[in-house]
Image (tube, coloured by chain):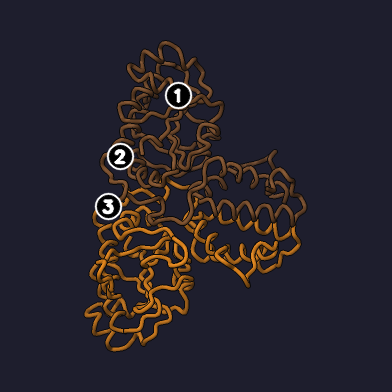
Chain colours: A orange, B brown
């Protein structure tokens, strides 16, 4: 289970935090680290110094240009966040995340990503809206400034607690029942959103020049339902049919 | 909280079970009972005899012709069931339901319905597919035949546990965060499904004469996402726009 949890660090400024995150992960049995568009050299000596014996994680670390790439194969994407600033989004505590993980990761092909933002400004709204859920680490009302590697440590600890304390066979799956289809991957889901936006623009319901919160609200709705692969195909099929019926289909999105 | 939980009995055959259900409810502080198309006289003396001091619940009991009517104003509809026989559906245990109820019922306008089927054949698939979730009472592998009033007793007990043991202010709301819009009611949601089926038929994606599982799958997807009222309006707006764009709108569904 722990080998299918990826820690994703976006836009990190301090190489020491990358090393510290690797160390935090290793103490809890995690090993899959991805850095996305770091604002420092993740191979800096400081990263190795802070990793202190977990250089193997740094050596195997993924380097991605975008969040999209870093989580493309993941079936659950959780963003560490205070909360979405523009639109409420499903939110859990670290302990609630811990309770969910064994069920989420029971299917052999399932993969989870825990996404951490920049030291100064966290995750952008666009990044937060690519997550199925957000996780908020409770901090003091008077001082909430958690170090990036410390935040990774807390969530990695809860991942390990999930693995230690919950027999995978007894934890509920995402819907509390054995499902009939695997959950959709992140990249298939993103292709659906691209197609949806195209179709809604085509029928004049959506104006990309004046988007308001339409796509964010539809993302929130469909992401929290945890689409399975057949549902995703049904929705793609409906969109393709609408495209054809309104004669605005284009071959790029209609397949 | 307990005054916003309705017990719905569908197609009950034995008036004694209706009285027994009323008694079970009253012991746990519930009072809102609805019978739907009973296969007996719910005012039979046997009902009053078994109610044993909870006649007030029988006197105030709702009489509905359909499940639709009985749960029209409810924001959460949970069906007591082994499990859906044709399509897996979100399923919880009584204890999980108990943990959910305080958050579900925190908004003042929220109402929950617990729906129980016939003594012999339970709930139909069509009825089960109108529920947000199913609840299964664990029983012995070798003997699982739970009496109807006994099933009501178990779930009423868990409702009371929810009320006693969980401070409403600390239980998570459905999405773990304060939401921006109230959840959609059952009847608004059903109108959406009617409109959706109409539109999908209009664009040739759905054939009511050969429905397969299309509408059941779309119901399952949207019911488990717990639509809020704005999301529901957005979806209605999209459907209306598709109807117009394909010039198959009809005034009945396009409003």
Q: Locate residue A90: give its quadrant.
A: bottom left
**Mark pair 2, 1: CA separation:** 22 Å
Please tell me which residue lies in front, B152 or B111.
B111
User: Closer to the observer: label 3 or label 1?
Assistant: 1
Label 3 environment density (alpha carbons within 10 Å; few <14, some 14–19, many ≥20): some
Q: Tell me, for residue A166, which label it has, or none.
A: 3
Q: What residue do we see at 73% from left, 45% from top?
A: B251
Label 2 environment density (alpha carbons within 10 Å; few <14, some 14–19, many ≥20): some
Circle 1 — which element? loop
User: Closer to the observer: label 3 or label 2?
Assistant: 2
Label 1 environment density (alpha carbons within 10 Å; few <14, some 14–19, many ≥20): some
Q: Which of the two labelled residues, at mark 2 and mark 1, occupies the earlier sequence position?
A: 1
From the top left corner, tell me how far across and down residue B63 is, in percent. 51, 24
The residue singled out by tag 1 in the image is B61
The residue singled out by tag 2 in the image is B163
**Mark pair 3, 2: CA separation:** 27 Å
Could you tell whether B191 is left or right of B88 in the image?
A: right
Could you tell whether B144 is left or right of A20 in the image?
A: right
Residue A71 vertical placement versus B69 (above, below)? below
Q: Chain of mark 3?
A: A
From the top left corner, tell me how far across and down residue B228 is, in percent. 51, 51
The count of marks equals 3
Q: Residue furthest top?
A: B45
Q: Are marks 3 and 2 on the same chain?
A: no
Query: Which quarter of the figure is the N terminus of chain A placed in?
Result: bottom left
Circle 3 — which element? loop
Please tell me which residue lies in front, A91 or B255.
B255
């Amino acid at each position: 289970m722990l080998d299918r949890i990826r820690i994703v660090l976006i836009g990190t400024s301090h190489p020491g935090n990358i090393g510290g995150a690797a160390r935090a992960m290793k103490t809890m049995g995690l090993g899959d680290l991805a850095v996305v568009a770091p604002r420092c050299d993740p191979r800096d000596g400081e990263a190795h110094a802070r990793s202190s014996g977990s250089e193997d994680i740094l050596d195997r670390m993924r380097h991605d240009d975008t969040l999209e790439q870093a989580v493309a194969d993941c079936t659950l994407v959780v963003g560490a966040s205070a909360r979405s600033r523009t639109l409420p989004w499903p939110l859990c505590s670290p302990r609630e995340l811990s309770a969910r993980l064994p069920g989420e990761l029971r299917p052999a092909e399932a993969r989870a990503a825990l996404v951490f933002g920049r030291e100064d400004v966290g995750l952008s709204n666009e990044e937060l809206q690519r997550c199925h859920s957000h996780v908020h680490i409770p901090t003091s009302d008077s001082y909430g400034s958690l170090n990036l590697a410390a935040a990774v440590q807390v969530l990695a600890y809860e991942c390990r607690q999930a693995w230690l304390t919950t027999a995978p066979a007894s934890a509920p799956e995402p819907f509390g029942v054995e499902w009939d289809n695997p959950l959709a991957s992140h990249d298939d889901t993103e292709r659906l959103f691209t197609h949806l936006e195209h179709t809604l623009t085509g029928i004049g319901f959506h104006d990309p020049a004046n988007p308001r919160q339409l796509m964010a609200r539809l993302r929130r709705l469909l992401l929290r339902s945890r689409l399975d692969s057949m549902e995703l195909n049904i929705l793609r099929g409906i969109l393709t049919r609408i495209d054809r019926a309104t004669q605005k289909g284009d071959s790029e999105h209609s397949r």
